[in-house]
Amino acid sequence: MSEKKTFLLPDLGEGLPDATVVEWYVKVGDVVRLDENLVSMETAKAVVDVPSPVSGKVLRLAGGPGDVIVTGTMLAEFEIDPSLPQRAEGQDTGHHHGPSHGVGSHAPSDGDKVVASDDGGAISAGAEAPAKRDDAGTVVGAMQSSDAVRSEQAVAVGGVKAMPAVRATARKLGVDIARVRATGADGVVTMDDVKRAAADGSAKPGVRPAVREVLETSPAFRALPPETRSEVAHNTVRSTLSQSGKPMRTQPPGVAASGQPEQLKGVRRNMARVMADAHAKVVPTTLCDDADLHAWLGKQDITARLVRAIVTACKTVPALNAWFDGDNLSRTMHPNVDIGIAVDTDDGLFVPALRNADMLDARGIREGINRLRSQVEARSLPASELSGYTISLSNFGMFAGRYATPVVVPPCVAIVGAGKLSHDVVAVIGGIEVHRRMPISLTFDHRACTGGEAARFLKALLDDMALPQ
């Protein structure tokens, strides 16, 4: 009798509770060999290929593109073929997912490729997948997680559905993803769809097709009954005028929305967890002031100056360059300054760490930031670079806004927010002058440091920003 093997989804990134199916490389009935790529999965940190733990025939696959699979649950089932190569019992694969590392851990990473154990989950002999994990390696901090979510179906009616890695590839290849013909399940645009469109030039950037055209070409839309299709089309292709040509009123509060709910996945899903955790654990207080840049000489790199000023302030008041353990009421102050740089993307918020910022000059800071941004855009950033920073910077003023209350994510105790530059009238001895100024918001965890320490930190930062160069 042939032996069957159930493969559980392994931990793909230091305690992440789930991952989303991007693309299956096999289908039910295929014969796969040991360590051949089985499926591409998206986590909150990266898109990784998961290889097969055995050689044999594929009997079952868990979900399709867009489905969320919980770590430790069934990913695939195989009928083992004893005539093909198999991994010996207890054989070391050379790639382990041991216990999750805390924020700030610098354990070496194996990159994006994952080699799984025979049983999936955390690789350790005889260990069972835990019901609850300490996720200490999330996109922007540490948090508790559990296996509450089982699976989610991708929503594709009336719009374009694609995974973040596919969108990133489309941007690189100059492809308008809204014009790509989707061949994936439920109308999902796959990586092959994008590459095919780039090769034949059928989706060059330009005017996007009309909403009705996108809707009517959607496989999910065509599968609906005729009466349902009519209602969906009526609700999707809207106008600000009624059939009589008169302006239409919006629906009053309390009327159910006609749009489709969309489950958060990947980076946005993890961001929601981390923000909720931070809100529950931190006692935030925010100080605001303005950095006067009137004395600056020539053109200068504003972000590099902000990083340098934060480093100076951390050296002046080390209490804010620290981690705080709220459970044990202990803090760890760091001799080095690793700054988490908030990077906003269409897929959600990333906070990669600029390591050893206190040892970098202006050129080194700029090169480091450019490298991190390019890796974020390409989704090639190692998971280890998304944790372990000692203080954070959010330069939201690049877009809009003067002051803010940035979110402190444990175990860090402080985050600096830089607002939009402005020209303000400033009183000086003998009259007034117009100075260029930058609003600065400093949010700190009041459990870990005093208001006086935060105020002295902010003053040291402002004094450094005011220097000519």
Image (cartoon, grey):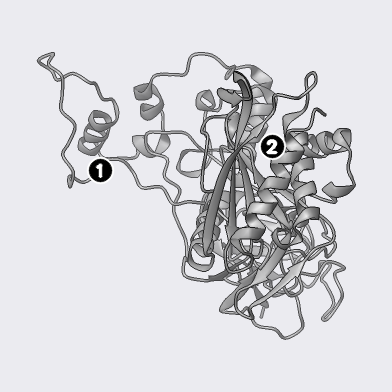
For the residue pair 404 and 195, the one nearer the viewer reads as: 404
Other residues around mark 1 within 10 Å, as few (<14) / some (14–19) / many (≥20):
few
Disc 2 to disc 1: CB gap under 8 Å: no
Q: Does residue 65 show up?
A: no
Q: Image point 64% across, 61% down: which residue? A: 413
Q: Position of residue 458 (x, y in %)?
A: 66, 48
Residue at x 51%, y 33% (from the top left corner) = 401
How far is disc 2 from disc 1 in space, using C-alphas? 33 Å
- Helix, strand or loop status at disc 2: helix
Residue shown at 16% from the left, 39% from the top: 252
Query: Which image quadrant: the N terminus?
Result: bottom right
Q: Position of residue 273 (x, y in %)?
A: 52, 60
Give the image quarter of residue 126. Answer: bottom right
Amino acid residing under circle 2? Glu
Callout 1: helix, strand or loop?
loop
In this view, the residue farthest toward the front is 430
Above or below for 176 versus 54: above
Q: Pointer 2: what residue?
A: 377
Q: Hey, which quadrant is residue 210 in on the image?
A: top left
Q: Nearer the viewer, residue 257 or 67?
A: 257
On the image, numbered disc 1 is attached to which residue?
Answer: 257
Query: Upstream in the sequence, badge 2 or badge 1?
Result: 1
Image quadrant where one finds the C terminus = top right
In the drawing, what numbered circle is on residue 38?
A: none
Q: Amino acid at mark 1?
A: Ala
User: Quarter-wise, where is residue 96 in the image?
Assistant: bottom right
- Image position, residue 55 (x, y; %): 76, 65
